Structure formats: structure tokens, C-alpha cells
Image (cartoon, rainbow, N blue to C red):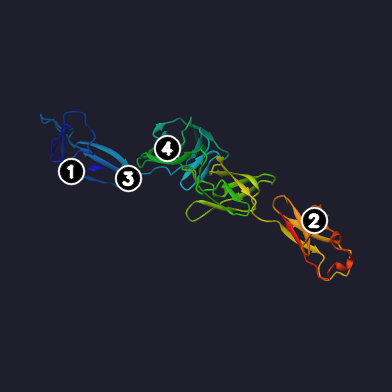
Amino acid sequence: CIKQQLRTPNANGLAFQNNVVTYDNAVSKLCGIDGDTREAYPEGSYTVNVKARDAAGNTLGVGGQDFTFEVNKQVPNAPAFALAGGIVKGATSFTADTTPLITFTFNPAETVMIEEVAVDSVLTTITSSVDGNGNAVFSAQLEQTSQGAHTLTVKAKKQIALASGGTGFGPSAQFSFAFAVDTVAPTITVIHQLPAQISSDQTVSLRLSVSDSVSGVNDTSVKAVITSQGKDSQTINLQKDGSGQFIASVTAIGLGQNTLNYEAKDALGNVNNNVQESFNAIDVTPPNVVALQPSGVIKSKSIMVNATITDISTVKEVTFELNGFPVSGAAKEGDFYTFSPEAFMLFNETEAAIPNNNVLKITAE
């Protein structure tokens, strides 16, 4: 700004009269005095003529003294910042490195003077190198940096050509780079409530709350690994619902003790797999019995009846009844149970006593 109108004395020892300034101390900056009006000037070269006289009437030359200055508002273009080994989400870069390396480059067509570099307002040192294209690269190798958000600022000036000839530097400009250090894994909170004991045919509904306040949760990483006695572990991927929580349903649960181990990662790969819970699954489903043979009309007195009996647990006992009479002699091979109805003859004196229509009852426990 340029003083447009000079006014009456003030605390700086300045006295103004008819646009002629007198002063009794070495105050040379006239801008910024309360009560003065100012005018913003466009870029260009300007000359101020100063006429001064002291109390004795001595004047500063006949025509006063000229002071020439130039208004130039050119600042550097914003540098390109990079965080080594980091990721970018929105306007912030993230890293799991507590001693991060940040580099920045200015427009190669500009000559820039870096005045200061600071992290969270604390000055830090930088080094410079030249990349493969011959451009200057500035590096800030930071010391131990705490968890959370930080800001690196660069204050710099751009070299400019002066209208009066030669070069100079324009006004200072400050550029900011937002980054965050994240070494902490997400937090997992179990929302659902599992009973200590459930039936094996029951569907278990899972619901978790997963949060990470710095780099955020990797939504595709949230999972549960269920380990059952006598069965291979199975992995269930939980999906994010409209409430922001993660849900899944678990079926085909193994009998006995089951353990659910939960896992989640943040955007940087920090993993939390330390949350788990257990429950006991019991068998409440009766065995499944399928008679395979005979079927239809069997024209033979010597037949073999085959039955398949399955259960999610071990079959404890199988009994056979033919027309209301117990039949012994059952044999087991895998899931197949066989017996010969000829044992029924023990309860009859002659073959003729065997009725034409027979009812076979198989009971499994």
C-alpha cells in the first residue's frame, strides 16, 4: 500500500503538514499508521517524492527526494508434495512410518528461494538433490513423529525480473501439506450377543463395530474365522450395512466348542486380530433314515434290506422292527445299515407265516 494522505502527528514522532512529512526519529515506513487512508496499487514501478523540512526551516533539497519502488505480487506455483511409502485419501496422505520422508518439487521453470520449512510450526531441516530430469527435489526427513494428523509448511519466494532491470524476489507465499501417521490397528467392538450354548442347526448372526480414527477401516478386510472341533476352519467375510456396522450369518456350525476370531485392517494394513469369543454347539436334530432297498414288490423270500442313516453327530443306536417284531443281526458299514429279514423266522414256525405285505420300522438315535 502507498500512503495517499498524510495527516497529523502520532506516537511514532511523525508530523504531517500539507503532505510534507517531518520526523524526529528514524521512522521510514509510513504504511500502517492508524487513521491513514491507503490505496492498493497494481503491479508496476512507482516513484514517491519526499519533501521534508525541520523546525528550523531546513528543507530536503529543492525538489525533495525521490524513492522508486516496484509492486510485484508474483509468488511460486504450489509445489508437488509426496510422502514416501504412503497412501493418499482425499486431501491427506497417510503413512505407518513414524520417521516419514516428505519430498517436494517446484515448477522447474521457476527459480525459488525457500525461506523456511516447518512441521506443526516447528522448523525442520531439508536437503536438496536433482532428479533424473535435472529438477531440484527437496527432502524433509522427519524425526520421530507422533500418531495422528500433522502439517508440513513451506515458505518460499519466486525470483522475478524487475521492471527497472535485474532480478529480485516477489512476496513470500506459504504452502501446506497435510499428512498423518497411523501405526494403530482398528478397534473391534462385538455388538451381537451369543449364548454360551446353541443348537447346531441354528444360524448365528454376527454384528461388529469397527473404527479407525486416522487412516480409516479397510471395509473389505473385516472377517471372522470360525474354528470347530473336528472341522476345518472357515472364513466368513462381514459386509458393511447401512448403519456402518459389519454383519454376517454363520451356518453349518460344528458340534462342540466353537471359536470365533475376528480380524480387521485399516487403510495402511495395521491389523487387529485379538478379539475372539467362544460358544458350544449341541446336536438337536434326529438322524436321517433313508431305506434304499427293498422297494415295490419283491418276489423272493431271501432279501436284504439296506438303509442309509446319517447324522451330524455319531449315530448311537439303530433298531429294526418287522411287522412290529424286533429284528436282530443288523450290521454297519459306514452309513449303511443292513439286516436279513430271515431272522424274523425265529418268531414263526413256517415260512408261510410271513405275510405278503410287510412293514419295516427303523429307529435311529
Q: Which residue is mark 4?
A: 154
Please indicate whether residue 195 sits to the left or right of residue 62 in the image: right
Quadrant in the rendering for residue 275: top right
Q: How crowded is the residue under tag 4: few (<14 C-alpha within 10 Å), some, or many (20+)? A: some
Residue under pointer 1: 5
Viewer-nearest of discs 2 and 3: 2
Q: Residue 190, how many percent across, how many down?
A: 51, 46
Q: Nearer the viewer, mark 2 or mark 1?
A: 2
Asked if residue 321 lies left or right of residue 5, the reply is: right
- The residue beneath circle 3 is 44
Residue at (62%, 48%) from the top-left corner?
281
Marks 1/4: CA–CA distance:
37 Å
Residue at image x 83%, y 58%? 339
Q: Is residue 28 visible?
A: yes
Which of the pair 327/245 is nearer the observer?
A: 327
In the rendered structure, which disc, 3 or 4, sits on the residue that comes first in sequence? 3
Label 2 environment density (alpha carbons within 10 Å; few <14, some 14–19, many ≥20): some
Within 10 Å of disc 3 (Cα), the crowding (few <14, some 14-19, many 20+) is few
Front residue (pair 70, 156): 156
* Label 1 element class: loop
